[in-house]
Image (cartoon, grey):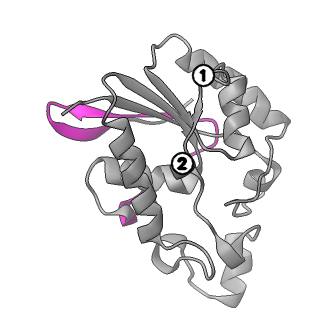
Amino acid sequence: MNRPDLWIVRHGETEWSATGRHTGRSDITLNDRGRAAAVALGKLVRGHRFDLVLTSPLARARETSALAGFGDVAALEPGLQEWDYGEYEGQTTPDIRRVRPGWTLFDDGCPGGETLGEVADRADQVIARVRQVDGTVLAFGHGHALRVLAARWIDATPQLGANLSLGTATVSVLGWERETPVIERWNAT
């Protein structure tokens, strides 16, 4: 079995992420801070060799990839798309809790959107693709979906993603300690 490292990058800030709006499948672009942060994080990753670069097809991830210096080599990976928030798309957690007190994404999901299990299935497919690579993979994606991916990387339940806060324009490294998958670095800027 190959034991590639997986470097994951959450896209830069958008107007919606800055205000806490759930941004699933809406194709929102980066704001000025997000573009500047994407350029800066490129300096963190450009000195490393990547055998495969993947990106979510959504504009904010593709733009982050391009500004970080990988736009010409990044392959689209639909499995890296953000959680589909269904009826909660564009809403903030306080907005949702006015109608549904105590709501949490990882416990309660979203009406008309994906379940945690469906997001985990997509994460497992991405992990299977990555583990076919003999080397290091760089992947640009989204906050909640990458948190689920990290949980699945270490063979944990997808629910563990609720405990892995992930800021915009951050780099995290998923790797190995001998044969055990581990989170080596989390939320680096």
What is the C-alpha distance between the residues marked 2 and 1?
A: 16 Å
Depth order, front residue of 16/53: 53
Q: Position of residue 35 (x, y in %)?
A: 78, 31
Q: Quadrant of residue 162?
A: bottom left
Q: Quadrant of residue 29?
A: top right
Q: Is residue 131 above or below residue 18?
A: above
* Image quarter hosting the N terminus: top left
* Image quarter hosting the C terminus: top right
Q: Which region shows up in magenta?
A: 159-184
Q: Position of residue 28 (x, y in %)?
A: 79, 50
Depth order, front residue of 141/126: 126
From this viewpoint, is residue 13 visible? no
Disc sitting over residue 73 in the figure? 1
Look at 56% across and 83% down and name the residue there.
102
Instruction: Examine the structure image and report whether residue 170 is included in the region drawn in magenta.
Output: yes
Q: Position of residue 56 (x, y in %)?
A: 60, 44
Disc sitting over residue 80 in the figure? 2
For badge 1, the amino acid type reads Val
Q: Is residue 91 above or below residue 182?
A: below
Q: Residues within 10 Å of mark 1 (few under 14, many from 20)?
A: few
Residue found at the far right of this picture: 32
Look at 45% across and 68% down and name the residue there.
118
SS label for mark 2 = helix
SS label for mark 1 = loop
For badge 2, the amino acid type reads Leu
Question: Which numbered disc, 2 or 1, marks the residue closer to the eye?
Answer: 1
Q: Is residue 163 above or below residue 140?
A: below
Q: Is residue 44 above or below residue 130?
A: above
Depth order, front residue of 102/122: 122
- Badge count: 2
Instruction: Examine the structure image and report whether residue 24 is included in the region drawn in magenta.
Output: no
Depth order, front residue of 42/69: 69
